[in-house]
Amino acid sequence: MANLVILLSISILINTFSLLIKSGDAQSYCNGQCETLDDCSGQLICINGECNDDPDVGTNICGGASSDGGCQPYDTLTCDGISHPKYSCSPPVTGSTPAKLTLNDFSPGGDGGGASECDGQYHDNGERIVALSTGWYAGGSRCLQTIRITAGNGWSTTARVVDECDSQRGCDEEHAYQPPCRNNIVDGSDAVWKALGLNEDWGVVDITWSMA
């Protein structure tokens, strides 16, 4: 009889716990499973079935959850038979944000594709200018602002944000048939590379950047 009572008590506890999990009061934190926005706690949102920071708001609650700040691709885009990840976010911006510096041609007909998003203009590559990955571009909120870039050789320079390095779209005429940018790209002009004392033939270089 005592064993039956214990089994009944355990069954009641399990059923109660299951109901709590299914109720609207149950909320997940960083990287917790979710189906709707209501499943996530506080300012977190549901991205690809996991609760994470809202890239549109710029929250950094889950910033320490992983090296990429919890920013994961949400889909892929296939170009010439090669699958490329698509991102709506970038790693958190800090006082020394790790990134990859790439080389961009901001002039008409260059590999930057269309005119710059921030001002609708093409630019001379002698200007110290950059395009930022979609998450860092943040819907244009950093347009025409100045950032500071530091290379591994210790050289540092400033540059103005004039464009988005699109992490969601690509492989079309507008993007000069380039695949989507990774989520950690600072796409710099010739002048930026020269100011940092870098060889453009390297193509991609590790840097850090911050708002100036």
Image: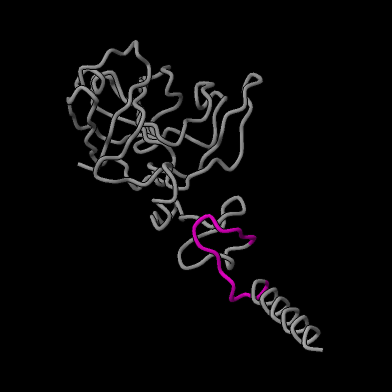
- Mark count: 0
**Which quarter of the figure is the N terminus placed in?**
bottom right
Residue at x 35%, y 13% (from the top left corner)? 202
- Residue 105 in the magenta stretch? The answer is no
Examine the image and state in which quarter residue 155 appears: top left
48 or 148, nearer to the observer: 48
Q: Is residue 64 above or below residue 151?
A: below
Residue 164's x, y, as percent?
A: 41, 35
The magenta segment: 22-35
Q: Is residue 56 left or right of residue 93?
A: right
Find the residue positioned furthest to the front. 2
Residue 104's x, y, as percent?
A: 37, 21
Q: Is residue 191 left or right of residue 33?
A: left
**Which quarter of the figure is the C terminus placed in?**
top left
Q: Is residue 143 left or right of residue 5?
A: left
Residue at x 62%, y 27% (from the top left corner)? 83
Q: Is residue 187 above or below residue 47?
A: above
Residue 125's x, y, as percent?
A: 28, 20
- Residue 26 in the magenta stretch? The answer is yes
Examine the image and state in which quarter residue 36 appears: bottom right
Residue at x 50%, y 26% (from the top left corner)? 175
Residue at x 21%, y 36% (from the top left corner)? 148
52 or 180, nearer to the observer: 52
Examine the image and state in which quarter residue 80 appears: top right
Residue 79's x, y, as percent?
A: 62, 23
Predominant secondary structure in magenta?
Answer: loop
85 or 145, nearer to the observer: 85
Q: Is residue 30 above or below residue 27?
A: above
152 or 149, nearer to the observer: 152
Q: Is residue 207 above or below residue 59?
A: above
